[in-house]
Amino acid sequence: MKKILILPGDGIGQEVTNECLKVISYFQKDCEIEYTEDLFGGASIDVHGEPLTKEVLKKAMEADAVLLGAVGGPKWEQLEHNLKPEKGLLTLRKELEAFANLRPGKVFPALIDASSLKKSIVKGTDIFVVRELTGGIYFGEPRYIKEVDGKKVGANNLIYSEDEIARVARVAFEIARKRRNKVTSLDKANVLEVMQLWRDVVSEIHSNEFKDVELDHLYIDNAAMQVIKRPSTFDVILAGNLFGDIISDEVAELTGSLGMLPSASIGNKYGIYEPVHGSAPDIAGQNIANPIAAILSLGMLFKYSLQLDSIHDLIESAVSETLNAGFRTKDIGIKDTLTCSQMGDEILKNIDKLS
Ligand code: NAD
């Protein structure tokens, strides 16, 4: 029996995960899966005084995968940093050793007009960014702002070990094998020693273990241009924490709406799946949020944690079909828009039709 822990969190996190529950329940008739729900983020602070309790963390470690909604909101903004809902998210990622962040950016044909780029450029775009999540400049020591000779100096340290690079490179190559078999690794090897190491290690892992996958390397500055010039030619993009952070948002912008973007953070053992968007306090409680990002995140969970690739593909096709039929939530449509739960129902109908 596969176990999924669902942490809806706050705001629209609760609404969009409700739609995921409908999808999970549907597949329970064919698959051995069970789920439990628990409190996380602000909802947990209100009851337990902390965003992630030890009990919930234990449940997450015992589960095969965790599905998150979103956390945060104005109610908890004044709390000190360590008690904020977002701290729960960071702790969960750290404790579950989720070192690879996966961010697909797929342009659905029905929503091609939502992209900020011309249709002819963005058509067929289906990029998958694999970003190193627990190392690099965001974590490197020493880090400081201090006074030197009466002037302030700030520093951070971009540091990667061979092992940190190798493990995330392997994730990217494995994913490419399940897609169009191509990895583009981003670095700045022409200027930074640590990035020369990045390039060397990625090349070594490639030639020793993944020769069947096509590999190319791009400098990050060139990549930032190529991604908007020829997005449809990319398959998997592999990058360190800083470059991956930036390029994944650039890729997101190609696709249009925040309500459409799924993500995952995975390690060797655990996987955390969540929509890219936040708790959207401005629309929370109105049943108008777009549940597609959350449902696509659940699709990723089936593929990357439960190895049920066919269910992932079915969910993606059902979303595509629903959009092709003209169904829209308020963030992606103008008139006759559906509520969050109606969109969930339409997607479910298509899952049933296509299965
Ligand atoms: P947000 O993503 O919550 O919202 C940004 C805008 O996009 C809002 O106008 C919102 O209505 C809209 N939007 C977002 N998701 C949508 C959806 N599914 N359907 C329709 N419209 C959608 O970002 P924010 O407003 O900057 O942050 C709100 C709160 O969420 C903050 O407390 C922030 O810290 C938190 N946050 C949490 C996460 C997370 O849990 N991973 C991520 C980002 C922000």
Image (cartoon, rainbow, N blue to C red):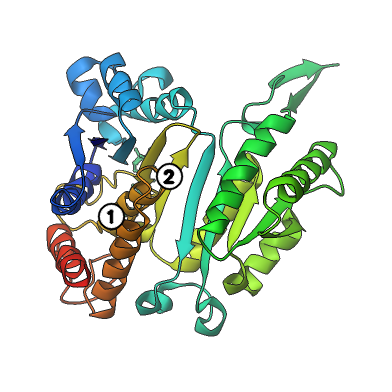
How dense is the environment of label 1, judged by Cα within 10 Å: few (below 14), some, or many (20 and up)?
A: many
Q: How many numbered discs?
A: 2
Quarter of the figure that contains the N terminus? top left
Q: Quadrant of residue 34?
A: top left
Q: Is residue 254 left or right of residue 352?
A: right
- In the image, residue 262 sits, relative to residue 155, either above or below, namely below
Quarter of the figure that contains the C terminus? bottom left
Ligand 1 closer than 8 Å to label 2 CB:
no
User: Looking at the image, which is closer to me, 121 or 104?
Assistant: 104
Q: Quadrant of residue 136?
A: top right
Q: What label sits on residue 270 in the rendered view?
A: none
Q: Secondary structure at mark 1?
A: helix
Q: What label sits on residue 295 in the rendered view?
A: 1
Residue plotted at (37% across, 26% down): 88
| Position in image of residue 119 (x %, y %) | 50, 82
| Position in image of residue 274 (x %, y %) | 35, 44
How dense is the environment of label 2, judged by Cα within 10 Å: few (below 14), some, or many (20 and up)?
A: many
Q: Are marks 2 and 1 in contact (CB under 8 Å)?
A: no
Name the amino acid, label 1: Ile
Farthest bottom residue in view: 120
Residue that numbered label 2 is attached to: 264
Task: Answer whether residue 31 is visible to the viewer in this image.
Answer: yes
| Position in image of residue 184 (x %, y %) | 68, 58
Residue plotted at (80% across, 36% down): 194
